[in-house]
Image: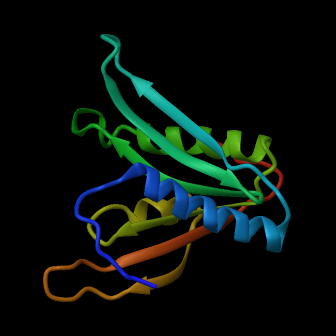
Amino acid sequence: MTVSQLEGENSELVDALVDGVRQYNFDKMGKEASAPLTVLAHDKTGKLIGGVYGRIIYKNFLIHVVWVDESARGAGLGRDLMLEAERVAISRGCQQAQVDTLDFQAPDFYQKLGFSIAGEIPAFDASPARYFLFKRYCDSVTR
């Protein structure tokens, strides 16, 4: 056996690692394909001003990115995008959502949407605290 370090990114090797984890998951949980879930907002000129991106697997909506352009913040767009993404997730059979965020980003935002903090990594030196949140779904998400 040899252990090596890779400088830079190599998508082929990353894909091989992901495939290994996926096969392990299949062996333990049964085969299920991960599916993307993306909700976007554009302004009247067509410029992207916000969105939510995540993946669905094993009835979980794993939220990877939530972003709203500075020009559109504070008007409820982030909330609307999240609620639409959650509506879609529920319609696809999700029973819960998961997200992580840094302390200066959006823990309060997610809590206002009904997410609960499941864990925290405290801040240290030049690294902010990180929060892990989840939300269990009932029958629907309402606006």
Q: Residue at x 30, y 55 (%)?
A: 9
The answer to whether one can see residue 142 in this image is no
Q: Residue furthest top?
A: 45
Which picture quadrant has residue 100? bottom left
* Picture coordinates of residue 45, whole percent (x, y): 30, 10
- Relative height, residue 17 to residue 91 (above, below): below
Residue drawn 60% across the image and 49% down it: 55
Residue 57 in view (yes/no): yes
User: Could you tell me which residue is drawn at 67 percent across and 62 percent down?
Assistant: 22
- Quadrant hosting residue 92: top right
The residue drawn where x is 24% and y is 77% is 128
Between 75 and 12, the one nearer to me in the picture = 12
Colour mapping: rainbow
Which residue reaches farthest left?
126
Q: Position of residue 4 (x, y in %)?
A: 32, 77
Residue 96 in the image: state x and y as whole percent: 71, 62
Q: x, y (%) of residue 47?
A: 30, 20
Please, is residue 84 above or below residue 66 in the view?
above
Horizontal placement of 140 versus 52: left or right?
right
**Looking at the image, how many numbered discs can be counted on the residues?**
0
Q: Quadrant of the C terminus?
A: top right
Viewed as shown, does residue 3 lie left or right of 34? left
Residue 140 lies left or right of residue 38; in this view the side is right
Residue 32, by quadrant, is: bottom right
